[in-house]
């Protein structure tokens, strides 16, 4: 997953229709719910909640929606129960795919995910079949479309904050760090005035696979779209070099 590809995906998601935005808010609401139930409703105490609130705001989720999700998860407005389940499998030509879900019906979700893989020329595998091909990293994207930021300054600030890798892309800067210091790195950079187009802990492929067959490319795009369109699916990671 190159930084430029990542940035292109971010811009594409931010330009989606209102219906797509509503779906993104639904997914974020589920994530908030699970994190509040696990660690409480106070972001000063629950670091993961602080992270997901920042993620929600980066996706332009209104503060009222965020507060409502927190209150609902803490029992003030009723509650839903979601289970975290991760699926692993292969797309066309053996592309490795990881699908992270939050669901209140594991049979429905498992059936849907299996159907998507089967329909797009892939197949579900056993737990652990592809996860060893990915590293977990904090990924922070700072947009710089108007070229207002100085690359050397951003790099030094990122490294001083605890980042382990930095790259300048065409319209953005990509910063990588260990998951254990992700919150500290993001907070340190925010204090210096930086804002993020995206800031999340993600699974980064160690190596990528290129697809040359047009049908495989079509089917891989279709698989990603079908998975991301499912309300139960939170994140989709793959090692396809788009």
Image (spheres, rainbow, N blue to C red):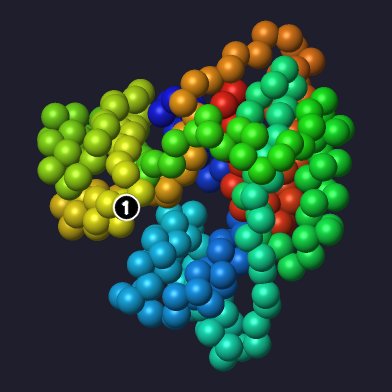
65 shown above or below 100: below
135 shown above or below 59: above
Picture quarter with the C terminus: top right
Q: Residue at x 56, y 91 (%)?
A: 76
The residue to which callout 1 is attached is 180
Classify mark 1: residues with Cα within 10 Å, few (<14), some (14-19) or many (20+): few
Residue 33, percent from left and from top: 57, 72
Residue 216, percent from left and from top: 75, 17
Tag 1 secondary structure: helix
Front residue of 127 and 173:
127
73 shown above or below 17: below
Q: Is residue 120 visible?
A: yes
Residue 136, percent from left and from top: 43, 41
Q: Residue at x 57, y 80 (%)?
A: 73
Residue 6, percent from left and from top: 47, 33
Q: Residue at x 36, y 29 (%)?
A: 171
Q: Residue furthest top?
A: 212
Residue 94 is left or right of residue 71, and the answer is right
Q: Residue at x 50, y 69 (%)?
A: 35
């Amino acid at each position: 997953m190159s930084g430029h590809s990542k940035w292109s995906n971010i811009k594409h998601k931010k330009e989606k229709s209102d219906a797509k935005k509503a779906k993104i808010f639904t997914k974020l609401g589920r994530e908030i719910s699970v994190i509040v139930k696990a660690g409480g409703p106070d972001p000063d105490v629950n670091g993961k909640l602080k992270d997901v609130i920042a993620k929600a705001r980066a996706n332009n989720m209104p503060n009222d929606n965020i507060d409502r999700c927190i209150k609902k998860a803490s029992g003030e407005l009723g509650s839903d129960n979601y289970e975290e389940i991760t699926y692993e499998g292969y797309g066309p030509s053996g592309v490795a795919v990881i699908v992270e879900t939050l669901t209140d019906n594991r049979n429905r979700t498992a059936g849907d995910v299996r159907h998507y893989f089967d329909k797009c020329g892939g197949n579900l595998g056993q737990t652990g079949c592809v996860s060893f091909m990915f590293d977990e990293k904090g990924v922070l994207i700072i947009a710089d479309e108007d070229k207002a930021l100085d690359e050397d300054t951003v790099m030094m600030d990122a490294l001083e904050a605890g980042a382990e890798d930095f790259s300048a892309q065409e319209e953005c800067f990509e910063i990588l760090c260990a998951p254990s210091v992700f919150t500290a790195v993001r907070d340190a950079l925010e204090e210096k005035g930086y804002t993020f187009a995206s800031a999340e802990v993600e699974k980064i492929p160690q190596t990528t696979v290129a697809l040359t067959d047009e049908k495989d490319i079509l089917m891989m795009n279709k698989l990603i779209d079908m998975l991301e369109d499912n309300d139960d699916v939170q994140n989709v990671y793959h090692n396809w070099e788009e």
